[in-house]
Image (tube, grey):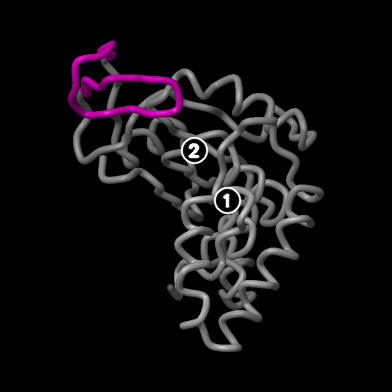
């Protein structure tokens, strides 16, 4: 219940229904946090416009992957350095990084090539200079290799009977070394890959 209190009803109808059943168990403080999150959702869509029918995690914009609670020394440390966004999805984390934390460049990795249109639209809607980010259709792993996956729209699976695609796998050390990157932050939202 504690995790679900911050989920906006409009983007998470399943969780909202579950939460409604357990609303009576929430403390007044949890209800206040939930109400604040719902009110904040409106400001997220103004601050970080996203393409229609584009999935995103509202908690990214609420918590900034924990950066909001980090001391200013952490913000100073990462500012002006390269960021890696593994599992870039539709660019929701990338726009938050680019608009709020002044990275030199954001390298956005995602193994799902079909998300490229949404990613490009996200960057356009937020007026992000294309020289500040790169979308890379590769996986990151512990060895340079290849990964065979099944791609289906927004989803990519490790096994199944659908369309199989071979994706290159790189290591962060290899990738950063080839480009002389100075990595300040690594964000990984990869669902177990």
Label 2, on which residue?
88
Q: Quick check: 117 left or right of 148?
A: right
How many labels, in total? 2
User: In the displayed structure, would residue 59 be above or below residue 21?
Assistant: above
Left or right of 123, for residue 138:
left
Residue 79 position in % (x across, y down): 64, 57
* Residue 34 falls in image quadrant: bottom right
| Callout 2: SS | loop
Q: Earlier in the sequence, mark 2 or mark 1?
A: 1
Query: Which residue occupies the extreme top position in the image?
Result: 163
| Residue at position x 45%, y 27% in the image | 154
In the displayed structure, 91 sits above or below 44; it is: above
* Residues packed near mark 2 inside 10 Å, few (<14), some (14 to 19) or many (20 plus): many
Q: Position of residue 182 (x, y in %)?
A: 49, 47
Q: Is residue 116 magenta?
A: no
> Quarter of the image containing the N terminus?
bottom left
Give x and y (percent) for residue 144. 22, 29
Residue that numbered label 1 is attached to: 81
The local crowd at label 1, few if under 14, some if 14 to 19, many if 20 or more residues have their Cα within 10 Å, is some
Image quarter (top left, top right, bottom left or bottom right) of the C terminus? top left
Extent of the magenta region = 146-165
Q: Residue at x 60, y 88 (%)?
A: 28
Q: CA distance from mark 2 to mark 1?
A: 18 Å
Q: Position of residue 131 (x, y in %)?
A: 68, 29
Mark 2, mark 1: which one is toward the viewer? 2
């Amino acid at each position: 219940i504690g995790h679900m209190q911050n989920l906006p009803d409009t983007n998470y109808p399943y969780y909202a229904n579950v939460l409604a059943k357990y609303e009576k168990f929430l403390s007044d403080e949890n209800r206040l946090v939930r109400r604040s999150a719902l009110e904040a959702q409106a400001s997220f869509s103004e601050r970080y416009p996203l393409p229609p029918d584009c999935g995103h995690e509202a908690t990214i914009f609420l918590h900034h992957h924990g950066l909001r609670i980090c001391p200013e020394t952490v913000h100073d440390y990462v500012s002006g350095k390269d960021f890696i966004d593994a599992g870039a999805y539709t660019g929701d984390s990338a726009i938050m990084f680019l608009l709020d934390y002044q990275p030199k460049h954001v390298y956005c990795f995602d193994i799902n090539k079909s998300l490229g249109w949404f990613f490009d639209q996200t960057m356009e809607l937020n007026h992000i200079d294309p020289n500040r980010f790169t979308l890379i259709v590769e996986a990151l792993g512990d060895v340079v290799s290849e990964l065979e996956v099944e791609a289906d729209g927004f989803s990519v699976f490790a096994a199944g009977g659908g369309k199989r695609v071979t994706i290159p796998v790189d290591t962060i050390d290899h990738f950063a070394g080839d480009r002389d990157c100075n990595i300040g932050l690594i964000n990984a939202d990869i669902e177990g890959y």
